[in-house]
Image (cartoon, helix red, strand yellow):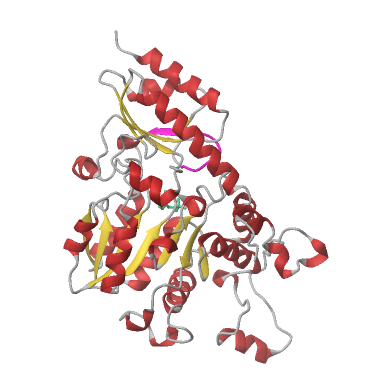
Amino acid sequence: MHQNGFTTTILHSDREQSVEHGAVHKPMHPSSEFAYEDARELAAVFQGKAGFTYARQGTPTTTALEAKVSRMEGGKGTVSFATGMAALSAIFTTLLRRGDHLVSSQFIFGNTNSLLGTLQELGVEITFVDVTDAAQVRAALRPETRMVFTETIANPGTQVADLAVIGQICREHGLVYVVDNTLTSPWMFQPASVGASLVMNSLSKYISGHGNALGGSVTDTGLYDWSGYANIYEAYRKGPSTSWGLTQVKKKGLRDMGGTLAAEPAHRIAVGAETLALRMARHCSNALALARLLESHRGVARVHYPGLPGHPQHERAKALFGSRFGGLLGVELAEGVDCFDFLNRLRVVLMATHLGDTRSLALPAAHTIYYEMGPERRRQMGIADSLIRVSVGIEDEADLLFDFDQALNACLPG
Ligand SMILES: *Cc1c(COP(=O)(O)O)cnc(C)c1O
């Protein structure tokens, strides 16, 4: 039987639930509460029947977006949040307890690094390892280990985790495998394919794509059987045991912690998602062209990009991501090229944090997003003082190449 592809599926997903008046989008529902004709029906929804009660726990608008994310990830269910950080907070704080052990990638988003520090204060033990080498994950395991966490491609060093082998290790040891898929997006990679239990996405990045909405999501792949997981509350041990974890993330994480995605950003993200495949292909081709230019430029010492044959995980990235390498570059400038001077000369590229926007963005990583963690942790994460992080946008390729070339040439010493 014919199966529709990625973009066709997303474009037509709202219509599957017959939208009012033939509208092509699910409408935005700004209501805070949902009323019922019959009080028994209200009680039934509180007791687990599908439906809406109070918007903190979801609306028809967030539900429509969640269905799209589940389709994109090949998952069984998704819960959306106000931001990616709210999604990560919900996963870690609702599924881990004092005395539990987490094995985490040492190459992680700066704010995730800070969040894991808070988790340590609360009594969760964490070992940070180099996830490009799955043996380090195996060596870190303890009897109290409950979960392994990694990103797909790390930022800004672009290390590619040994995602498939880590998945096997988690399966052998019954561990929850959480993958942050933000840098790859479900168009490049579905973590379910390597056995992930939960997939997190910052919807603010490529999925939304236009720099006009924040959001986050947790998708359940249905691959983990939570019946043997100690931290699931009795109340959520109902229905198939493969869905208990996401139920707990939704109840304890979304409902109780309250990082709810509002209807308007949910709608914007859903519209953005319609062109994810088109944008992502352009991000990837622009980034590869730029990486090649920069690699051969006198003003550059090193380029970190998985699409370059010299990248330590180039072959792995080809195999995992179907020879698509993403839109993020780490660029170490040559001795004598001042990173601030260089950035100030860029004309098309914006100096801003954020990534996955249609517009190209650049910043000096050690002095901004990785400033708070200090020099020692930066060394451990491989972040040099001269490292520029570039989120390559979808501008015309020639304009981007010209902009970087002119800015570098103007900064060359002597
Ligand atoms: C941006 C980002 C997050 C956090 O997402 P927000 O939506 O900004 O809260 C988490 N992980 C990665 C890899 C990110 O790039």
| Relative image position of residue 287 (x, y in whole percent) | 46, 34
402 to 124, vertically: above or below: above
Asked if residue 17 is among those painted magenta in the image, a careful observer would answer no
| Relative image position of residue 102 (x, y in whole percent) | 26, 65
| Relative image position of residue 33 (x, y in whole percent) | 64, 74
What quarter of the picture does the N terminus occupy? Answer: bottom right
What quarter of the picture does the C terminus occupy? Answer: top left
- What residue is drawn where x is 63% and y is 78%? 51
247 to 21, vertically: above or below: below
Q: Quadrant of residue 375?
A: top left
Nearer to us in this view, 165 or 407? 165
Q: Please say whether residue 175 is visible from this viewpoint.
A: no
Q: Is residue 212 left or right of residue 376?
A: right
Asked if residue 363 is among those painted magenta in the image, a careful observer would answer yes
- Write down the region rendered in magenta: 355-364
Residue, far front = 1
| Relative image position of residue 382 (x, y in whole percent) | 24, 40
Nearer to us in this view, 206 or 116? 206
Residue, far bottom = 40
Nearer to us in this view, 329 or 281? 281
Q: Please say whether residue 51 is visible from this viewpoint.
A: yes
Q: Quadrant of residue 104?
A: bottom left
Q: Is residue 276 left or right of residue 144?
A: right
Q: Quadrant of residue 304?
A: top left
- What residue is drawn where x is 27% and y is 50%? 132
- What residue is drawn where x is 42% and y is 72%? 223
What secondary structure prevails in the magenta region?
loop
